[in-house]
Amino acid sequence: MVDNRRRVVFIGAAGEMCRLAIERFAVAAGDWKLELYDIRPELLDQLIELLPTGLATAARLDLFDADGLRNVVEGAALVVLGAGPYNRTAGPVMDACLAAKVPYLDFDDDIESTLHALTLTDIAREAGVPMYIGCGASPGITNVLVADAAGELDSVENIDVYWVVGDERGSIGRAVLDHMLRVAAGPCMAWQNGGPVMHQSWLETRWTELGAGLGLTMVHETAHPEPVTLPRKYPDAKNIRCFGGLDPAPYNGLIRGVGLAVQKGQMPVEEAIDFLVALLTNKFGSVQGWRHALSGLRGVVRTGEVTRTELIKFLAKAAVGHTFPYKSGLKVEVTGLRNGVPTVVSRRTPTSGPGTYLFTDMAAATGTACAAFMVVALDDESGSRAGVFTPEEWAEPQRFYQALERVGTPRDEILDVSH
């Protein structure tokens, strides 16, 4: 029998975040056929067993094989790219989707590939193809929170985006570590005084009150796509910044020290990632890596982010493989005028860690958000939108929150209503 169900194609399906996106989308999948592609399809066997019988199939794909990629995306209702790093993978897949005239969606969090995607806006519009980028947690949920908060104001002056990620040992892939090294050191695009400026990541810090048990937390300005994309919707805003951090706080110094070593050419990026992988799997790591990591750890003591006592306790616990309670969260603050009165409107996520659904870990947050964005995109009528879009431009906040519920998120995990 011919299978006439509409096809959703996942590329890089075996990645931790994409696997979660597939699982969560399956909750609301309906009459879809999910085609899962990866360079190592055998890693998908267990996932397919978890899904309803007949819902998904798996096959091998090298996304840099132009002919194979073209055959896979042809005729799809939506292509979801979950393979990173996006500064290498997004270009070929977006080009294939444009050529085949099929919708595209990713959870890209790299500035370089985001900027490249935005240059394709006119081409996508002329081709009649919607391309949805940055559909994860940050960017993604954060952008929707900004649109929600800004909707309460008559004019927008400042937008601040905050994210914190907890102890992720054992579940972080190399692409995520590559991204973290680049956001902890190096150039950082921001929007200041009504225009784009270049800062250095992790240099400017501020304290902010976060939910999910984090409380008052120091965060660091970081290279993320939100200050690059939000000015398209809010061109009159004076300042748009993104600040991020890791919990417990000593991780900020560790990643900063190693990231600076990579930026200065003192350590090859692959060796730096090897060192971080070793630490995250409770191995000692290289002596060279520790030299740079300790330099960064001394830095967070100097700035007052961590006391010497706190650092010693952290190192002692980490040395014996202690995993710290997982805390993570997102927050946005938007300032502007409402009825002529200066007003601050904020949104933040309320909970995280074991027993939660949306913020169990980074993969759950990103994968669940991606699944919800997929639901909104597929609910829209075919041909109703064309171009390259970031979440604040197309995902209406209430529809997105409802989509999060449709993919299994409890309503009380979506927003901190008491804040």
Image (tube, rainbow, N blue to C red):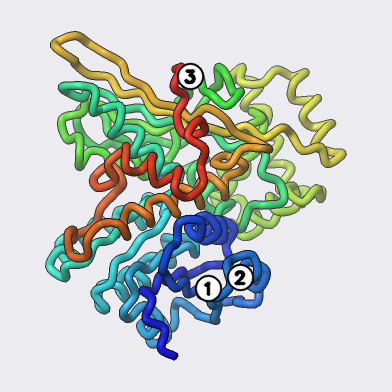
Q: Secondary structure at mark 3?
A: strand
- Amino acid type at circle 2 is Ile
Q: Which mark is residue 48?
A: 2
Q: Nearer the viewer, mark 3 or mark 2?
A: 2
Count of marks overlaid on the render = 3
**Outermost residue, front side:** 1
Q: Residue at x 57, y 62 (%)?
A: 15
Q: Residue furthest right?
A: 320
How packed mark 2 is, by other alpha carbons closer than 10 Å (few <14, some 14-19, many 20 or more), is some
Q: Position of residue 25 (x, y in %)?
A: 48, 57
Q: Are marks 1 and 2 in contact (CB under 8 Å)?
A: yes
Q: Which quadrant of the structure image shows residue 57?
A: bottom right
Where is residue 272 shown, x and y percent of the image? 64, 53
**What amino acid type is highlighted by mark number 3?**
Thr
Distance in Å between CA atoms under marks 3 and 2: 41 Å
Determine the CA span between mark 1 and mark 2: 6 Å
Few, some or many C-alpha atoms within 10 Å of disc 3 (few <14, some 14-19, many ≥20)? some
Which callout, 3 or 2, points at the residue further toward the start of the chain? Answer: 2
Quadrant of the image containing the N terminus = bottom left
Q: Residues within 10 Å of mark 1 (few under 14, many from 20)?
A: many
Mark yes or no: residue 299 visible: yes
- In three-dimensional space, the C-alpha distance between marks 3 and 1, rounded to whole angstroms, equals 43 Å
Per the image, the residue denoted by label 3 is 208
Position above or below: 91 against 289: below
The residue drawn where x is 16% and y is 67% is 128
Q: Residue 220, which numbered label?
A: none
**Mark 1 lies on residue:** 56
In the image, residue 376 above or below residue 197: below
Looking at the picture, tell me which residue is in the foreground, 154 or 162. Answer: 154
